């Protein structure tokens, strides 16, 4: 039988360590390590492991071990992963723990317990997020006090898993919303709002530093006709291909975005707008026809401060240069003598 006094002092140590881990640990690995080490010490276990369970995937994944040699860890993970009937996998699926399981360890028989890590999302529906297992060499009897302590340790580990996974999900969701807010869904380029904001910032910086900013506006030739004759799927394919060439052709300091149905805008710090525009058009000229449609673009380029003293006038000058392009797939320049 376990020492009740030891279990009591162990309970206090586990509670203190678990509370500290949940309140201050910077990552899941650290939190689990603190909880499992305190738990193993409290119940006198020589080995321990935590397996995580992703509801969208089959099986369990080894997250942490304690007291195992490196070679044994690999073999243990493979043993559990390759056996759907393994008690640890069963504990995760059935949410039912096992106490006093006897297994053959590297140094002889061991007694193990497998505790499902069960949480509720506040909806009353319980979910198993993993399994905590402890092991003792030889024969070990789990009494009522120790069982209570083990369940408490498992609850702390479950809380850590749920807390850090939720934090990760929130961070991923926030990143996704941030990306969506600034990205055109079809092409993956910046959207109109982002392009205009970047242009305003670059013009303001150039005005302070006495520098240049180039703006190029690209328009897909015959896009309306393509959509009418071949359908929107063909039009979308052309837009994605053009966007790919644009993304490959610009510099790291440049910003390229889709600002209209078939309109793209490049914001290029410095005076390299015409050079980049030519590189873009050269790349697009290599594209294969889509539904018999030869893909090409026309472009208009303007520069700050020669062609506009603010973002709005500069963009207007580039669009005017685009409209004034006299030939198919050409580059119109608002100030050709300064380009």
Image (cartoon, rainbow, N blue to C red):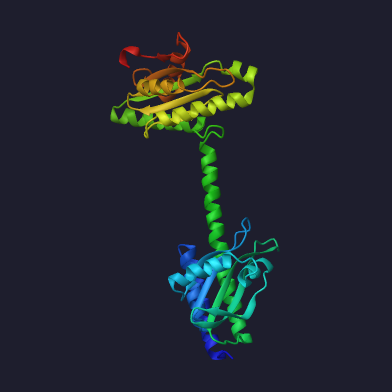
Of 285 and 27, the residue lying toward us: 285
Which residue is drawn at the image coordinates 45% and 10% (left, top)? Answer: 324
Query: In the figure, 194 relative to 57: above or below?
Result: above
| Residue at 39% in and 14% down | 334
Q: Is residue 289 left or right of residue 275?
A: right
Q: Is residue 72 visible?
A: yes
Q: Find the residue positioned furthest to the top.
A: 326
- Where's residue 248, x and y in %? 42, 31
Which residue is drawn at the image coordinates 39% and 23% (left, top)?
Answer: 279
Nearest the eye: 196 or 144: 144
Residue 298 or 267: which is nearer the viewer?
Answer: 298
Residue 21 showing in the rendered view: no
Which image quarter holds the N terminus?
bottom right
Q: Relative to 12, is 248 on the left or the right?
A: left
Number of marks drawn: 0
Residue 43 in the image: above or below residue 289? below
Placement of 177 over or under 332, stated as above or below: below
Residue 219 location in percent, x, y? 50, 19
Name the quadrant containing residue 267: top left
Position of 316 with respect to 90 (left or right) is: left
- Residue 232 drawn at (x, y percent): 63, 24
């Amino acid at each position: 039988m376990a020492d009740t006094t030891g279990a009591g002092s162990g309970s206090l140590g586990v509670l203190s360590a678990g509370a500290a881990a949940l309140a201050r640990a910077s990552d899941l690995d650290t939190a689990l390590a603190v909880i499992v080490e305190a738990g193993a010490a409290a119940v006198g276990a020589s080995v321990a492991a935590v397996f995580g369970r992703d509801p969208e995937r089959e099986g369990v994944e080894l997250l942490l071990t304690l007291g195992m040699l490196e070679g044994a860890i690999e073999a243990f993970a493979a043993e559990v992963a390759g056996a759907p009937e393994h008690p640890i996998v069963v504990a995760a699926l059935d949410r039912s723990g096992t106490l006093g399981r006897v297994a053959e360890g590297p140094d002889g028989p061991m007694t193990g317990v497998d505790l499902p890590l069960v949480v509720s999302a506040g909806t009353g529906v319980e979910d198993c997020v993993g399994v905590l297992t402890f092991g003792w060499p030889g024969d070990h009897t789990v009494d009522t006090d120790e069982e209570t302590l083990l369940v408490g340790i498992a609850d702390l580990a479950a809380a850590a898993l749920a807390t850090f996974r939720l934090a990760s999900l929130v961070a991923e969701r926030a990143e996704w919303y941030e990306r969506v807010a600034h990205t055109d869904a079809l092409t993956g380029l910046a959207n109109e709002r982002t392009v205009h904001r970047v242009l305003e910032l670059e013009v303001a910086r150039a005005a302070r530093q006495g520098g240049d900013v180039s703006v190029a506006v690209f328009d897909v030739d015959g896009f309306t006709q393509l959509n009418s004759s071949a359908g929107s799927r063909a039009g979308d394919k052309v837009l994605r291909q053009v966007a790919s060439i644009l993304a490959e052709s610009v510099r790291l300091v440049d910003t390229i975005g889709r600002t209209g149905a078939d309109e793209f805008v490049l914001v290029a710090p410095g005076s390299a707008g015409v050079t980049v525009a030519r590189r873009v058009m050269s790349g697009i000229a290599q594209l294969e026809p889509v539904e018999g449609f030869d893909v090409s673009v026309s472009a208009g380029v303007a520069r700050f401060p020669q062609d506009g003293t603010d973002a709005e006038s500069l963009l207007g000058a580039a669009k005017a240069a685009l409209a004034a392009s006299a030939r198919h797939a050409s580059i119109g320049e608002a100030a050709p003598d300064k380009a």
